Amino acid sequence: MEFSVFGNLPGVTVVLVALAGACLAFLRYNFHPATIFLGDTGSMFIGLVLGVISLQTFTKNTFFLAMTIPMLVLGVPIYDALLAIWRSPCGAS
């Protein structure tokens, strides 16, 4: 988040601050006894946002790292969605 504030990227800063605020607000209700749970969709959304933000803020010095890690992060939800579609009972007789 420090890079986005000092790197003159206000849109990225707003998204990261909103994500951090949402995670902290969620954490308040997730302590024992938990009344809400994050689940697969919530955790994948957090990973997706972090992957997209890292793709948008890469520099030429760290090109390989900036392209490899987000592709791995984005690959997990895409792979899981494809598996869920493939396993769906709609196509079963």
Image (cartoon, rainbow, N blue to C red):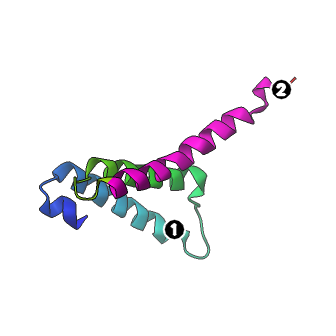
* Position of 86 relative to 34 (above/below): above
Q: Quadrant of the C terminus?
A: top right
Residue 31 found in image quarter: bottom right
Q: Position of residue 62 (x, y in %)?
A: 28, 58
Q: Residue at x 22, y 53 (%)?
A: 60
Would you say 22 lies left or right of 12 here? right
Q: Report crowding for label 1: few under 14, some 14 to 19, many 20 or more residues within 10 A (C-alpha).
A: few
Q: Nearer the viewer, residue 33 or 49?
A: 49
Q: Nearer the viewer, residue 33 or 91?
A: 91
Q: Is residue 87 magenta?
A: yes
Q: Which residue is mark 2?
A: 92
Residue 29, which numbered label? 1
Give, as a single range, the part of the protein colored magenta: 64-91
Q: Is residue 24 above or below residue 19?
A: below
Magenta stretch prevailing secondary structure? helix
29 part of magenta stretch: no
Q: Amino acid at mark 2?
A: Ala
Residue 46: give x, y in percent of width and height: 45, 55
For the point 13% across and 63% down, the residue is 6
Q: Residue 53 got which mark?
A: none
Query: Which mark is nearer the camera, 1 or 2?
Result: 2
